Amino acid sequence: MNRAFRAGAIGMLATFASLVAILVGADLLYLDPATLWNEIADAETLFAIRLSLITASVTTALAMALALPAAYALSRFKIPFAGVVDTLIDLPIVLPPLLIGFSLLVVYQTTLGDLLVAGGLDLRYSVPGIVLAQFLVAAAFAIRTLKATFDSIDPRLEEVARTLGATPARAFIRVVLPLARRGMVAGAVMTWARAIGEFGPILIFCGATRWRTEVLPIAIWLDFSVGKIEAAMALAVIMLAISTLSLVAFKRLGGQGYLW
Amino acid sequence: MIRVSDLRVSTGSFRLRGMSLDLPTGAYGAIVGPTGAGKTLLLEAIAGLQPMDSGAVFAHGEDLSSAPPEHRRLGYVPQDRALFPHMSVARNIAFGLDDRAPDNSSRVSNLVGELGIAHLVDRRPSTLSGGEAQRVALARALAPDPPALLLDEPLTGLDPATRLDMISVLRNVHRSMGTTILHVTHEMEEALALADHLGVIRGGRILQWGPLDSVYDHPMDESVARSVGVDNLLRAKVDRAGRMVAAGFDLRGPNGLSPGSALVAIRAGNVLVMSAESGRGQPARVSSVRRRSRDLLLRLLAPGEEDGEGLLASISPAAAREIGVREGADVRVAVDTEGVHVIGRR
């Protein structure tokens, strides 16, 4: 009975791992190396790679700047309506991606949107708009991963630091930040990976325009939709490599928390 | 000096309910109570780590009730020590020192020398034993030279030999630095070994507080008596002549007792056991003998009281051999009049 139970559980695990391995293997084996290299060296592909790297990096910097204090507040302080705040933070992660892009467009149809446009902040169909669309999901994700990091640090350490004369800010800088460093780097890596893979909100809010809002996922979609399967697959292999490396880095850095 | 006046603190469903204590400058106070009595919460409130509902905390002549922890100058050693895991022992100890002060390294050197941890300065906390970690935590708390120290169960989790070492370390620190120390524990033995003031805490209240001898020898009620480890808590009867009898033994209690019943506390060490041939005291039979770490605990029954709770007496193994103590043996017993404490009248 014990052996059958163990075999059944491991069997299920092996089945799913095999399924993912088949998908990855199919992607990798679809193109020969020469074709893959030619597609990657294409100017438009390089533009998509560059735009993705820039927007995802800016998004990650902004998300971490916001997530660091926000996650600390969520981890340490008693916040009014904490359950509501917690749910709102998670919402961008679980909402259908298209809905986030759609909601952003809807905001621009309101008085707030009019004010933003009047203030020169019309981000629709623009590169800054890509950052905004990535940011909404990436920031939620960064807050989650950083909160898990802060939760793993014993608050008693900060309390003792304060009895030794440290202000709350000094205790945070001298005790919490050094202990959270690996978790922060791991969180940033995964936030970046999440941002670079964002597709739905960008498609709706920024459109799919070649040489303008063409980040990697948009480029894959554009190539796929006109039948350029080799180009789409080359980009897919790049995305696969980025995702895999990010995940490995996250795990090696001891990243904590759940991944959506 | 640490003075707590009518302190009330709430956390979840637990409350500290009007706690007061007064620890003079340079004194060593111990508060004894079981797990969940509110010992840690009390120290946290004094240290400024728990918001108070009401009451006041004074230390070194100042009202600290609304001061943040960093301004209280109270060294705090939590039960889990909470050493900073990313710092070496030396950096842990220097944490509370002014970074710009020129004599930081000599302060750290003096402390590690005094506490016998000079060989540990480059180590990380994760590599330390329980006793070593406790000394480092103590050195860290002492480094800024606080006038008072708060110690939360500092000997818990240490093996017996290390506990003895730590007791002597704490004694030396108290003696050489003159620091006022408030120490909470669930072990009466720790309080007896170190403190000159004693408190008993239970259910979020300090039941009794005062100089060690007064609380230890004169517990105010049954609950305190049990907490301070009184061996015999006996229902006694006082007759019209003022004679007090408990468990069949004439106790010769304090003079002037009116007739009725009383609850009396007698430590086993205040019961003198003699050989049956001595002719002194009262006759008794040994109903059981239990070995303890330093002595034997005897249960003695008075003639005609075979079903009673008896009287507990302690005796050294050598004395027990000398007078032939064993289960069923006849002996004579006398109770030291000074050791009979009436804690309740009925």
Image (spheres, coloured by chain):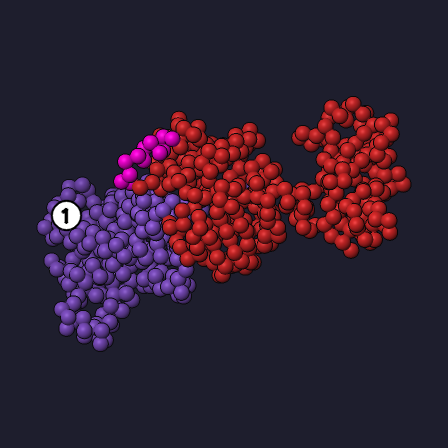
Chain colours: A purple, B red
Which residue: 43% across, 30% down?
B114
Left or right, A83 with reference to A234: right
Q: Does B100 lie within the magenta span?
A: yes
User: Label 1: which residue?
Assistant: A39
Amino acid, disc 1: Glu
Residue situated in front as seen by the camera: B244 or A35: B244
Q: Which residues are magenta?
A: B99-110
Which residue: 73% across, 33% down?
B314
Residue situated in front as seen by the camera: A144 or B64: B64
Question: For mark 1, does the 10 Å Cα neighbourhood hold few (<14), some (14 to 19), or many (20 or more) residues?
Answer: some
**In this picture, is A36 found above or below B57?**
above
Which image quarter holds the N terminus of chain A?
top right
State which quadrant residue A254 falls in.
top left
Pinpoint residue B89: horizontal percent, then vertical percent. 38, 34
Pinpoint residue B302: horizontal percent, then vertical percent. 85, 39
Which image quarter holds the C terminus of chain A?
bottom left
Residue situated in front as seen by the camera: A120 or A229: A120
In terms of secondary structure, where does tag 1 sit?
A: helix
Which residue: 35% across, 60% down?
A90
Residue situated in front as seen by the camera: B94 or A194: B94
* Callout 1: chain: A
Q: Residue furthest front?
A: B256
State which quadrant residue B294 falls in.
top right
Pinpoint residue B19: horizontal percent, then vertical percent. 55, 55
**Number of numbered discs present?**
1
Q: Residue furthest left?
A: A43
- Look at the image and tell me whether residue A227 can be seen: no
Left or right, B59 with reference to B87: right
Left or right, A141 with reference to B289: left
Which residue: 21% across, 66% down?
A205
**In this picture, is A209 found above or below B144?**
below
Left or right, A127 with reference to A240: left
